[in-house]
Amino acid sequence: MEAEANSGSPEDSWAFIQRPGEGCRTVPLAGHVGFDSLPDQLVNQSISQGFCFNILCVGETGLGKSTLMDTLFNTKFEGEPATHTQPGVQLQSNTYDLQESNVGLKLTIVSTVGFGDQINKEDSYRPIVEFIDAQFEAYLQEELKIRRLLHNYHDSRIHACLYFIAPTGHSLKSLDLVTMKKLDSKVNVIPIIAKSDAISKSELTKFKIKITSELVSNGVQIYQFPMDDEAVAEVNGTMNAHLPFAVIGSTEELKIGNKMVKVRQYPWGTVQVENEAHCDFVKLREMLIRVNMEDLREQTHSRHYELYRRCKLEEMGFKDTDPDSKPFSLQETYEAKRNEFLGELQKKEEEMRQMFVQRVKEKEAELKEAEKELHEKFDRLKKLHQDEKKKLEDKKKSLDDEVNAFKQRKTAAELLQSQGSQAGGSQTLKRDKEKKKTREEKSISDGTCTTPGKHPVVPCALVVCAV
Amino acid sequence: MKKRQKKNGGSPMDPLRQSPSRSSSRASSPRTLPCEMLGYVGIEAVLDQLKIKAMKMGFEFNIMVVGQSGLGKSTMVNTLFKSKMWKSTMPGLGVPTPQTLQLQSVTHVIEESGVKLKLTVTDTPGFGDQINNDKCWDPILGYINEQYEHYLQEEILITRQRHIPDTRVHCCVYFVPPTGHWLRPLDIEFLQRLCRTVNVVPVIARADSLTIEEREAFRHRIQENLKTHGIEVYPQKCFDEDINDKILNSKIRDFEYSSLCYTERIPFAVVGADREHIVNGRCVLGRKTKWGIIEVENMAHCEFPLLRDLLIRSHLQDLKDITHNVHYENYRIFRLNESHVLPRGPGWVNLAPAPASVPAPAGPQANPSPPKVGGWAKDNSDEEC
C-alpha cells in the first residue's frame, strides 16, 4: 500500500492535507505490532480511575426499595425505614464504596422519601425532576468552567431510575403514569413490580401486559436494553420482552440443599429470591449490573445529559449559527450577553434612583403641608385662648365691681342702721337685722368664694328694701 | 474482598498542570461509606462491557515525527507499525528540497486481533533544512494548536456529536541527529516550545553510527541538556509515581522494564529498517552493512523495542490521556481566557497582538522567559499564514 503525499497550496507556508476520515486505507501488518493490548490499557486506566454508578429508586413508602438495594448488592446499607408522615417528597442520597477484586465502584443510591403519602400528590414528581436536573446542572457548570477537573469529577448524574410499581394486580396508578412521563426524557427509567410475591403467576402475566400497554399508550419511553452489539443483543432482546421485572427483595438467608439462599419465609412456603421461577430478580441483576451498566452510563451522558445541555444553553441564549449562518462563537455570545446584562443593570439602577428622588420630594411636600397646618392650628388655638382669657378677665372685673358696690352698700346700710338704732331701735329688729346681716355676710362670703357670677346683691337688695 | 487503600493524587507541580486521573484521586465526599459485600455481585463485569464498547468503537492515535531530512523518520514509522505507511523518501535527483516547511499527514486503519486502530502520521519534511531555520517550529506549533482548536470548537457546540473525532497530536517523536556531542540550539529551541504543548519523545536517530559508549555519553549529555533547559519530555516526571503504581497493578505487562528504565534511557537510540534479512536462521528486520547486520529488534543493538513498547504496547492510552487531560485543558484555559474572537472558517487563529493584561498562556516551566511564552502568539501575527 503506498502512502499518499500531496503538497500543500503555495500560499500557506505549511499545509495540512487529507484530514483523517477521508480516504482511510486499511494497511496490512507484516508482523505483530502490539496494539491489541489497547483495550487492556484502557481498562487499566479505568480501573485506577474507578467507576461511578448512581441509582434512583422511586416508589411509595413501604414497597421495599431499601431491601431491594441490599439484595442487589449483597450488603446491608444502613438506613431506617421511613414513616408515612412526611409533609412532602424528599430525596435521600447515600454514597458507598464497593470493591470487588480490583474494581472499585462508587455507588450512590438516591431514594424518595414520602412519595405517594400526601393527600394531594400533584407536585410529587417535582422534587425528583429537580434533583435530576440539579445533578445535570452541576456537571454542566463543571464542564463550562475555564479551569475544570473533569477527570477527577465525581459524577453524580443519575444513571438508572428504578420505578417501583405497587403490586395491585390491576393497572398503573395515575401517579405512576404522571411521574414516569415526566422522568422518561431525563433519565433511564426501568419500571419494576415490587413485592411481587403478593401476586400469583397468572395475575402477574396479565399485570405485565396491562402495564406495558398503558405505558405505550401514554407514550412513556422506558429504557430498552441495547441490541446493537451482537454479543449481548440476544440476551437483551429476551430480557426486553420480560419488562417490567417482577422482583422480590430479601436479606434473610436459609440453607436449602447445601448452600445459603436468600428467601422470604411464609407459613405456606418459602420464596427464593434468586430462583428464576419465583421472580425476576436474577434478570434484573443481570441486566442492571452485569450486562448493561456501561450502556446505562453512556446513555445518560450522551443522550439525557446532551439534551439537558442543549436546552439549557439555548435557554441562556446561545446559538450555534447566527442569522448569517456563520458559526457563532461562544466568546462573542458571552460578551454580548454580558454587555446586555450590564446595560440592564444600569437602566434599573437609574430607574430606582429616579423613583427614590421622586418619593423623597413627595414626602417633603407632605411634611411641609403638615407643618403649615400645625402652625395654623397653633395660631388659632392661641387666639382662642386669648379671647377666653379676656372674657374671663372682663367677667372677673365686673364681679369685682359688683362686690365693691355691694360692700359700699353694706357700709352704707350699716351706717343707716346704726343711726336707726340710736333713734330707738328694737332689739328684735336689730337681732333680725343682725341675723340677716350674718346670713348676708355668710352668703356673700359664700357667694364670693364659690360663685363669683352669682349675684349676692339679691339678699342685699332685700335688706335694703326692708330697711 | 479487599478494602481499597486510598491513594493520594499525583503531586501537583503547579496549579496549571494537573496530573491525570491515573491514581484514584477522586474526591471522596465525607459521606462515602466503605461497604463490604457479602457475596459476588458481578460488578467487575463492567470491565468486559468497557472492552466490548471500546473494540466496537475503535481507537485513534495521532503521531507526529519531526526531524531533519535523512534521519530515517519515514523508515522508523514503517518499522514501528510494520507496514508501509510511507514510501521511504530518498533524495532523488529530480526532487527539489522543499523551500518551506510542509506538513504531510496520512491516515491508515490497522487491525490486529479485532482491535481497530486509526493511525494518523504527520511528517514534517523541510524541518531544519534551510539555511535560516528561524521560527521553523511555528508551523508545527500552529498545526498542533489548530487540532486543539478544532476539538474545542466541536466541544462547545450546542448540538455536538456523540464522538468527537480526535485529530489532536498525541505524541511527537523528535529525531536528534547523532552528532555525539550535545543538543543543537535548534533542538533546544524546538523542544522547549513543544514540550509544553504536546508529549515529546526524543530519540537519537541513526544510532548505528555511534558505538555503545558514545551512545551512553551522548545520552547523558542530552539528559543534562534537557534538565538545564527545563524541558520535560514524556514520560513527564510529575506523573511518575502513578506510572510505577500502574505498572505494579497492570496485567498486560509481559516485559520487565520499569518506568525508571524509561526515564533513564530517554532519549532512546534507535535504528529503523524495513528490510528483512536472515540471521541465524531467523528472519529479522535489520540493516545490512559490510561489517554486520544491525538487528532492529535486538536490545543489544539498538533500543527500538523500548520505543515501540513505550509508544504502542503500554503507554498509548496514557499518551492520549495526558494529551486530553493536560495539554488540551491548558490550551482550552488559555483560549477561553483571552477575549479575542474565535475564528470563522479555515485558517489559523487571527490573534491580535496580545495586550499587556492578557495572562501568559499555560507555561509551568519558568525557564523559558515570559516574552518567549507569549512570543509565539506575536510571531504568528507577523508571519503570513
Image: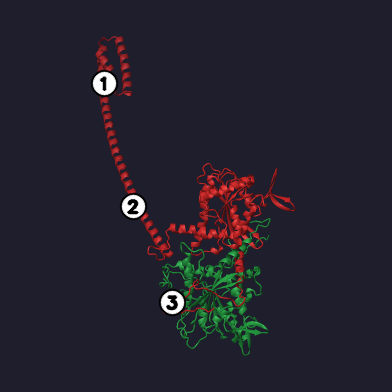
Residue marked by disc 2: A354
Give residue A95's position: percent from left, percent from top. Answer: 60, 55
Secondary structure category for the residue under label 1: helix
Residue marked by disc 1: A406
A63 vs A267, nearest the viewer:
A267
Q: What letter labels the chain drawn in green?
A: B
Looking at the rendered structure, the kind of residue marked 2 is: Gln
Q: Quadrant of the C terminus of chain B?
A: bottom left
Label 2 crowding class (10 Å Cα cut-off): few <14, some 14-19, many 20+?
A: few
Residue B244 in view (yes/no): yes
B271 vs B378, nearest the viewer:
B271
Is there CB contact under 8 Å for labels 1 and 3? no
Looking at the rendered structure, the kind of residue marked 3 is: Asp
Q: On residue B379, which mark appears?
A: 3
In this rendering, the label closer to the viewer, 2 or 3: 3
Residue drawn at point x = 26 percent, y = 12 percent: A466
Q: In screen coordinates, is B139 left or right of A189?
A: left
Looking at the rendered structure, the kind of residue marked 1 is: Phe
B42 vs A156, nearest the viewer:
B42
Residue B2 quadrant: bottom right
Residue drawn at point x = 66 percent, y = 54 percent: A74
Look at chain A in the picture and name its colour.
red
Q: Is residue B249 above or below residue A280?
A: below
Badge 1: chain ID: A
Q: On residue B362, which mark appears?
A: none
Secondary structure category for the residue under label 3: helix
Badge 2: chain ID: A
Badge 3: chain ID: B
Q: Is residue B164 above or below residue A428?
A: below
